[in-house]
Image (cartoon, coloured by chain):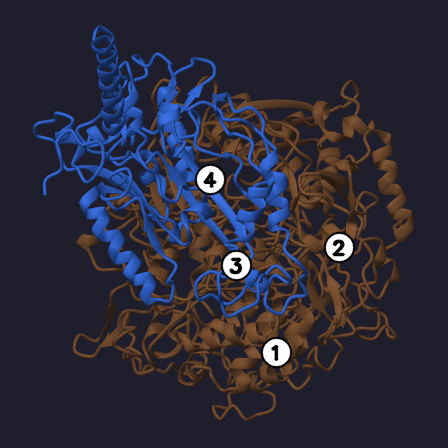
Chain colours: A blue, B brown
Amino acid sequence: MLPDPNSLAGPLDPAPEAGWPEAPPRMGFFTDTSVCIGCKACEVACKEWNDVPASGMDLLGMSYDNTGALTANSWRHVAFVEQPRPAGHRTPPFAGNPTGGTTSPSSAAVGATTRDPVGTEPGVPTGSPEAAARMAAGPEFLGMPGGQPPGRATGAETRSDFRWLMMSDVCKHCTHAACLDVCPTGSLFRTEFGTVVVQEDICNGCGYCISACPYGVIDRREDDGRAWKCTLCYDRIGAGKTPACAQACPTESIQYGPLEELRERAAARVATLHERGVPEARLYGHDPNDGVGGDGAFFLLLDEPEVYGLPPDPVVTTRDLPKMWKQAGLAALAMAAAAVAVFVGGSS
Amino acid sequence: MAEAHPVGFQWVMEAKLRGAKVFHVDPRFTRTSALADTYLPIRAGTDIALLGGVVRYILENELDFREYVLAYTNAATIVSEEFVDAEDGDGIFSGFNPETGAYDQTSWQYAGQEGHSGSMDTSSERDTAAGLRHESHGAPIPGQVLRDASLQHPRCVYQILKRHYARYTPEMVERVCGIPQEKFLELARAWTENSGRERTGALVYSVGWTQHSVGVQYIRTGAIIQTLLGNMGRPGGGVMALRGHASIQGSTDIPTLFNLLPGYLPMPQHDKHPTFGAWVDSIHHPGQKGYWANARAYCASLLKAYWGDAATPENDFCYGYMPRMTGDHGTYQQVLNMIDGKVKGYFLLGQNPAVGSAHGRAQRLGMANLDWLVVRDLFMIESATFWRNGPEVETGEIVPEQCRTEVFFLPAASHVEKEGTFTQTQRMLQWREKAVEPPGDARSELWFFYHLGRKLREKLAGSDKPRDRALLDLAWDYPTHGPLAEPSAEAVLREINGFEVATGRPLGGFAEAKDDGSTAMGCWIYSGVYADGVNQANRRKPRHEQNWVAGEWGWAWPANRRTLYNRASADPDGRPWSERKKYIWWDEEKGEWTGYDVPDFEKTKPPSYRPEPGTSGPAGLAGDDPFVMQADGKAWLYAPTGVVDGPLPTHYEPVESPMRNPLYRQQANPARKMYPHPVNSVNPSPPEDQWRVFPYVFTVSRLTEHHTAGGMSRMVRPLAELQPEMFVEVSPELAAEVGLTHLGWAHLVTGRAVIEAKVLVTDRLTPLRVEGRIIHQVWLPYHFGFEGMVTGDSANDLFGIILDPNVLIQESKVGTCDVQPGRRPTGAALREMVEDYRRRAGITPQRHAPVVTPPGSGASDAS
């Protein structure tokens, strides 16, 4: 069934829908975190090409992540997750070493509380030490029936298992982009490549987009008050070039191309990893039937999205607008009817 | 590798995609470990024990590639009966002279050659880092040797090797390295299973592996394994050194070293090489087999390139103008000489020793005691501002108003602002165009030296002083272009390639070099890079348009060979060892060697060729002697000469270690290069009891986000903000022991310095169990200094100066220290703290750790 052309959710090819009559194929990113080496070349290439300002010179203590989050001044962000958990089929790194308990949760808790200004709003919000500690320890035992007594399987007593996950995060360029939907000036627009771009000369800094983004990506600069985020290098791809981050990535963790092709490649990669004994490999943001109609920038992850600080089930915040307006309309009608009834009643 | 060489690591990832298994051995869990299949934490400085364990595993299980080993290595060669192995000498080989701390190599020779080769006193080789010469060719020995092809003779190399490593068992690896036996066996199995007729394995290391008092022997052990497994001269094999910067390979080929001339020709020594003939004879050893026999032509052509028309056969090509060495002029000796007031001026180009060299305080004190210092760099680095901003200003040791050094800072052009070549680890030269003009006064090195030379010559013009002749007679004429009068880098490359003097025709290769002055050649191993007048380094034919070896991309020395000694990729009869690993083979019909690469062998010498006894030069090598730059055509499992601290790698503890050597009475490398100087000191190690003052092991290396001493990254905002502060990584166990908190401060103390750093408590570091004891290791990045957008104390300040004896590389990957919570003292109190530790450790200017560990301090008695 074809989606409703005015639909705010569900599968859709966004560029034609936005009025591009002969749109080229939708372009996007596939970020394969299983080959990310955490070199941050993407962050540097992005800043250099797009002339993105500084985002603070502070040691965050969150492993090697000193960027903290995606902000108006950091359009690529490499997350580093240290956890006392097994990684795939690998030999436990510290098996046989005289290790004690893990420090990951406690240092993650300390790291979560340190935050210097990065010059953007809301910038990098201070985290919850408790949540950070829980995240660092890995998935929790939630009391469901299982083969082991509660708490036994967390691996926290001695740390023989360890994994260091790395992931380069970026704006998702949603099929249904709430930031764009709520932008009152038309500063945010859908490009012919299906990506979402802010026109900085039109942005009036209202900030509606910030609360609308289900991923917490878009952000405002404190100095000029305007919203900034990844443009998927609109200037480069328009000239047939690869975005700066993907161009700089040494291991092809960041792949750029037609979204359809990337989705096929990603599915094949997941299958390969499953064959090689990495059952935890999964895709995130690839599904056109998810809450945002699928992402233009999607990922291969090695654990639940929460582990990387990603929302598990993002929903475009404007999905329910028609229903809400319908409800509001009904309510208004009902009010009017009631009022009429009152007058009618009064006259009787 | 992912940390320091992320771009090169893409090929490891590519191999992984094809199913390769990656092992990573490192004291700390790094970004490489995160992607590896198996990670082995190791105690810093114990790699020979680990690799020796692999050698033993191969030999005990007879997993060597026997046909290859028999035919292509010196396994069957019989060694002198005078030789006493370190196993029988409690860690010291025969020939050691305790007076000089150096070996006489006579007893290490092959049987029957005792009087003919080897050095009687290697202390002179040590002073001149003579090991560096062997980067392009093996050490000299006479060709005729006694062999036992059954490998049963008790003194054949194979049996000596077997005895030498017999005690390097998995249990011993665990005791020394802290690597659990199961993990060691997993590594040994994978390495051996992926070598042989059908498969090859590559050993890739980075320069941190060399920075040990036994650095050269680390690489030797790796080379022994690769040779035993038949992984040399074959596709997918080899020992690859990932260099620390672009073109570091180039900077040893065309050296920026005190002891080498271009193409690994040795710098003449004042006492040994008074004449051109004596110098040439010391290189090619008359009567020796192999390619080095043409050294006279290379030497004559080099001097001809230097002095042009003035250089004639009659005046020995101006050999008299050549500077001569009188001993150790290495960078560390120079720094001590500066402190002692023996050096007046110093040029620093693209180097930041105030941060990047061991014993930063000595570096800065030395540079503060010059008449003048020229610093050419992209940014105002610490080595240019130490006299006003350095830590010694704070402690009162350098007073800016009184510092006598006049510093000249000259801005340098970056690699995108100048043209030229980079030579990478595969010995491949790749030409680089200039992208933009350098800003302001910034200029290329080529511009600087050409115009400096031009101005000096102008000032001396008309001088009749003999001492000025060397400068005035130089062939110093290069075309320049552009508004800045930039010399043509292609003209320089053409001179490096060599040309016929009469016609100017570029030479096609070093075989065309003449010793009669009719050719000039700036670097013999690079000859061919400008063959046919074409810049071969600038070839960029896509890999899809040529075979997989891609010989038409750039140009590799020698003679555009991509794999050295590739004759070894075929069996003794010239057939490929296997279809899968086919590379170079003998074409019987055409009567020549052929294959995917340029054969590293005389093209028409058949596999069956056998020389008449006594034949010298290339004709002296047989048709199945693939290692053509070795005097016997064989790969050396055992090195009778050329390595000054032993013919076989042996585990010694790092000079600073909290452990007693579990294998031998001898604690540390007895032939190590030491510098007794009041500013230099060594922390005590067992059997000295005061090691307890410095109970922790520290090691340093790079972060992906920064580059070496930080001059190119701490000054650049998008890089600086990624790692904005100096930190030290500690395990949770050590944090608990010492009382360190995550993101709090710690300070580290050695006998040289105290530095502070923010603490990162991380599961990525682990304590090790070694000999029943728990050893804690901490890790620091060495990028930080006091200038730039992000600053911090320099990790290299912690080190003293102790060098490997073969190439004079410093031991700057392992040392001992104390770790304390909180910030360090400042001002004079800082030096007092160091003095207090020195007092407790018994470190005085007079005290030197004994070179030979005295009897009565048996192995392991200190634990």
Q: Position of residue B794 (x, y in %)?
A: 67, 38
Residue at numbered disc 3 = A143
Q: In the drawing, does residue B208 fall left or right of residue B398? A: left
Disc 1 residue crowd, few under 14, some 14–19, many 20+, Cα 10 Å: many
Chain identity of mark 2: B
**SS of the residue at dot 2?**
strand
Chain identity of mark 4: B
Compute the Cα span from label 3 to label 1: 43 Å
Chain identity of mark 1: B
Chain identity of mark 3: A
Mark in front: 1 vs 4? 1
Asked whether residue B504 is in view, the answer is no
**SS of the residue at dot 4?**
helix
Q: Amino acid at mark 3?
A: Gly
Disc 4 residue crowd, few under 14, some 14–19, many 20+, Cα 10 Å: many
- For residue A96, what is the image quadrant? bottom right
Residue at numbered disc 4 = B307
Mark positioned earlier in the residue sequence (1 or 2): 1
Residue nearest the observer in this picture, B621 or A278: A278
> Cβ–Cβ below 8 Å for labels 1 and 2?
no
Residue at numbered disc 1 = B170
Residue nearest the observer in this picture, B192 or A331: A331
